[in-house]
Image (cartoon, rainbow, N blue to C red):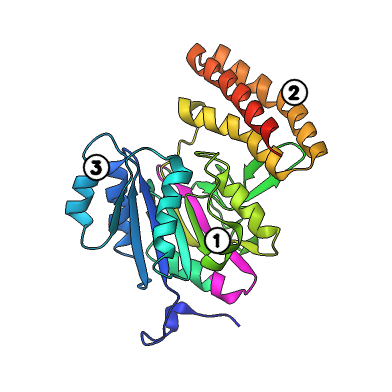
Amino acid sequence: MKVDLKNVQCSICLPKVAIVILNWNGLRDTIECLISLREITYRDYDVFLVDNASQGNDADVLARMFGDCVRLIRNNRNLGFTGGNNVGISDAIANMPDYVLLLSNDVVVDPSFLSELIEAAESDPKAGMAGPKIYYYDQTKRIFSAGARINFWTGNTTSIGAREFDKGQFDSIADVDYISGCAMLVKVEVIRKIGLLNENYFAYREDAEWCVKAKRLGYKILYVPKARVWHKAPIEPRKTGRLPLYYMTRNRFLFAKRNSTNLQFLCSLACFLFTDFIVVNCSLLFLRRDMMLLREFYRAIRDGLHIALREQ
């Protein structure tokens, strides 16, 4: 039975949500994200704000501005996206929520986004996770992700609708392979079964693996188009920086080894060699002329294969 949360009475007990936000040297973005959360229509939620050992005084500023409405957790070192969020998730679960929402600090939300996510998740008993339609922050009608697909034979993960302008072509709820970790609603019962994020990833592909684990237990991963957020991601891939390039490349191998068959893993290596390897080399050598990034790319390949081949 579909549950219309927009029309329920205040006296009805709604699912409790713990929103986990990770800050690392992103004070201005985090402030804008938290301000947007103040306007949401869903009311039964708590915010767990994790500062991942920012270099400046981010944590002190955030405590002064939002200390009365968030639980601030200060890590003593940068634990990455995975480790930092795991600290927040663990603290949040201790407060017995029904759902945990991972929300990147560089995201701005629509007021009804959480109500829409909860309504979709509560309406389907098989739903384990739910994610919104994500737009680019700088082009507010251009899609960053409408869910995502995984091809285990090539090792590629593809955001559905990426860079397309929204013309209503992705306006139906869908069961997808995975949803972006920048806005991911997860039932606590699922987390108890699949565990926390794998900290070997540090950042990137950990969200895909989390979804794969949930799907293999029979849960649906729902893309919910009426839930909308805007993400401060670069539209052009060529603007990808050193750390994203390193971890996206390295973790491709780790993800494929952990989640594919041996034959699929070997096929994904062949696909990488004859597609991405050539494309990235040409881009960094001839278009960007960036030898530092090229060295980082080779280091990521070396480290990724080393880590992946140690996986059992």
Q: Position of residue 145 (x, y in %)?
A: 55, 49
Instruction: Indicate left or right for 92 with 226 as reference.
Output: left
Residue 58, quarter of the rendered image:
top left
Q: Which mark is residue 58?
A: 3
Q: Which residue is mark 2?
A: 274
Kind of residue at badge 3? Asp
Residue under the point 25% across and 63% down: 69
Q: Residues within 10 Å of mark 2 (few under 14, many from 20)?
A: few
What separation in Å lies between label 2 and label 3 (alpha carbons)?
Answer: 44 Å
Instruction: Indicate whether 12 appears above or below 105.
Output: below
Which quarter shows the N terminus?
Answer: bottom right
> Which circle, 2 or 1, is nearer the viewer?
1
Q: Which residue is mark 1?
A: 191
Front-most of residues 196 and 3? 196
User: Which residue sits at x=57%, y=24%?
Assistant: 300
Marks counted in the figure total 3
Q: Secondary structure at mark 1?
A: helix
Q: CA distance from mark 3 to mark 1?
A: 29 Å
Task: Give the percent coordinates (x, y) of residue 141.
Answer: 47, 50
Q: Is residue 137 magenta?
A: yes
